[in-house]
Image (tube, rainbow, N blue to C red):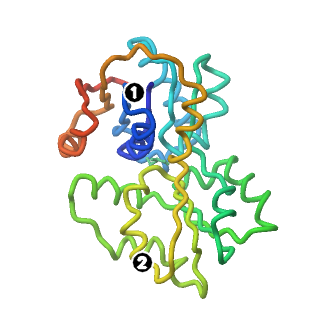
Amino acid sequence: MLIIDSGIGGLSVLNNIKKELPNIHYIYMLDNEAFPYGKKRDNFIIKRMIKIINIIKKNYPIKIVILGCNTASTISLSILRKFFNIPIIGVLPTLNTAIKTTKNKIIGLIATEGTINSTYIKKMIYQSSFRYNIKIIATNELAKIAEKKIRKLSISNAKLKKIFNPWILLPIPPDTIILGCTHFSFLKIEIKKNFYNQINFIDPGEIITNELKKTFCSEKIKKNILLCSKYNKKIKQLLFFLKKYEFKKIQEINLN
Ligand code: DGL
């Protein structure tokens, strides 16, 4: 199993997978050289995903790919599925669970600019906006805050509040928030603090395991490997956090 993200976000997806499939082995592609994906053009994301999958597939016997990233999934999933003949699963924000969960009928969707501007999300919003009150925040900053938190660097609550102000200042803020970026799963406590009302989080990375169980066939990868696109200081700062994922090898791969 190969999991791809621009940073630590996909690790929140991996956490969910490991809960259900504790013995699974994985290659985690941390494309830090291209972080943040949220700012990149669609074409860049599509080409980057194709490149990453092709290079890794040549060197490792991967049988399934998980896009542990909403930005990559909303922009490239349907194209990648046509391009490759191995199963590819993506993390995609959906409204179903949020609709069932919300009590005040106000749903928040927060994601990167890339995700919010994707055709996938535009269609989803267009089809539902007549019936549901959906509030949207597009931000490329929150993923950066999550990256800092995981590295135990100080994070600014003022910055976080500024991101959520459009909802905080509403007469009735959303009671249900769809976390449309896998990075945001690491910030649930910090986000909650900004609201006086009860918040339910919908995390698309939590439901991916059902799909994975359906598709998963026995794998050939026998150890966990972390690949990054730039082995730099920022990766070194992560090593402590990465311990629990038991990577036997950490290696830079050249994507240029
Ligand atoms: N973790 C990614 C997502 O789920 C993207 C963060 C970024 O690189 O902008 O959208």
Residue extending furthest bottom? Answer: 171
Q: In which quarter of the image is residue 207?
A: top right
- Picture coordinates of residue 112, whole percent (x, y): 51, 55
Of residues 59 and 178, the one nearer the viewer is 178
Residue for point 43% across, 57% down: 184
Amino acid type at image mark 2: Asn
| C-alpha distance separating marks 1 and 2 | 37 Å
Look at the numbered discs 1 and 2 and tell me whether their residues touch, using CB distance below 8 Å: no
Q: In this view, does 48 lie above or below 141?
A: above
Direction from residue 254 to residue 72 in the image, left or right: right
Residue for point 77% across, 58% down: 126
Mark 2, Cα crowd under 10 Å, few <14 / some 14-19 / many 20+, is some
Q: In this view, does 204 lie above or below 105?
A: above
Mark 1, Cα crowd under 10 Å, few <14 / some 14-19 / many 20+, is some
- Picture coordinates of residue 161, whole percent (x, y): 41, 76
SS at mark 1 in the image: loop
Residue 6 visible (yes or no): no
The mark that comes first in sequence, 1 or 2, is 1
On the rendered image, what quadrant is the C terminus found in?
top left
The residue pinned by badge 2 equals: 194
SS at mark 2 in the image: loop
The residue pinned by badge 1 equals: 24
Residue for point 49% across, 78% down: 165
